[in-house]
Image (tube, rainbow, N blue to C red):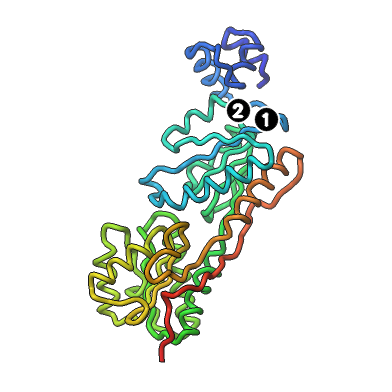
Amino acid sequence: MRIQDIAKEAGVSTATISRVFSNHPNIRPEIRERVLKIARKYGFHPRLSNKRRNVVIVTPSKLEYPVQSYTEMLSSELSRELSARDYRTEILPQDNLERLDGIQFCAVIFAGMTDKIAEDWDSRFDAPLIVLDRILEKSYKGVFSVHSDEAQGMELAISHLVEKGHQKIGALIGTIGLGNASVREKCILESLARHKLPCDKSLVRFAGPENNLEEAGKLLRKGVDAIFCPGGNAGIITAYSLSLYGKRIPEDISIISSERAMVTRYCVPAQTSISQDYSALVSSTAEIIDARLDGRDFPETTVLPYKLIVRDSVSERN
């Protein structure tokens, strides 16, 4: 399928086709939709050009990925890095993905997407889809994954608690089926087993904001001396839940959370946390876009280590 073929079937000129794919404002909506419908029918998309410098950052819906503070931190870092490399960015809500068919871009960046979106990506668009913070179930043509090493990150937190003498560690890891919660459950249980600590599933619980208090109480009844809260804002929410049970941090129970800008360091006490390397995440993402525009190969998957930030919410145990 060539641009001339689309023009002939749509009954318009090739110049009009070019204006549609360049998102020209002076194209009537009915003509735009007719051209895009024909293009979708034949799987046509304009060829990627290194003159095209628009990058679309898709913000996931709250239902699919409810941790807005994380996506806001990531979007801020991405905008800064891409601007420094002379890319223009556009924010697009996941609920408006159909807009991708009518605009030009050199890459799409998506935090926390599902494999369903990746399945037919290459047949629809001649530009890379870069997935952040998600381990894809399989390989998809034209789709790249940049994420942190979940096994290493979970081990980083558990080993720190073990070094401080904790003997029974629990975890609250977010809502089952969302984000990386299931992956983290598996990694935490494996880490506990390696350290020869209690590792039955009742110690690693799925807890969103709505049931954190209840699930924290279940861990306390199990006799845990530390709680690990990877993902989202679970650290600050769990600290509040523990206060309602009359538990002091770290005197009665230690806590490790995920790093959140303007939150974890200002808690009382300041929370020890694991942090993704946001600078490396966005730099790797930009490198993928540069490579595609330059015609260079780039690995489909980039895995980056977590960092441990030691503060005051973990104490020594005798």
Q: Is residue 267 left or right of residue 244?
A: right
Spatial CA span between label 1 and label 2: 7 Å
Q: Where is residue 47 in the image (x, y as percent from the top left)?
A: 68, 28
Q: In this view, does 3 lie to the left or right of 103?
A: right
Q: Give the vertical position of 107 relative to 259 (above or below).
A: above
| Residue that appears at 49% across and 28% down | 99
Q: What mark, if any, has residue 218 been given in the picture?
A: none
- Who comes first in sequence, dot 1 or dot 2? 1
Q: Where is residue 264 in the image (x, y as percent from the top left)?
A: 43, 63
Q: Give the vertical position of 139 relative to 251 (above or below).
A: above
Q: What mark, if any, has residue 52 been given in the picture?
A: 1
Residues marked 1 and 2 touching at CB (< 8 Å): yes
Q: Position of residue 20 (x, y in %)?
A: 58, 18
Q: Name the residue under label 2.
A: 104
Q: Where is residue 233 in the image (x, y as percent from the top left)?
A: 39, 59
Q: Which of 253 and 214 is in front in this view?
A: 253
Q: In this view, does 171 lie to the left or right of 4?
A: left
Q: What residue type is disc 1 on?
A: Arg
Q: What residue type is disc 2 on?
A: Gln
* Quadrant holding the C terminus: bottom left
Q: Nearer the viewer, residue 24 or 300?
A: 24
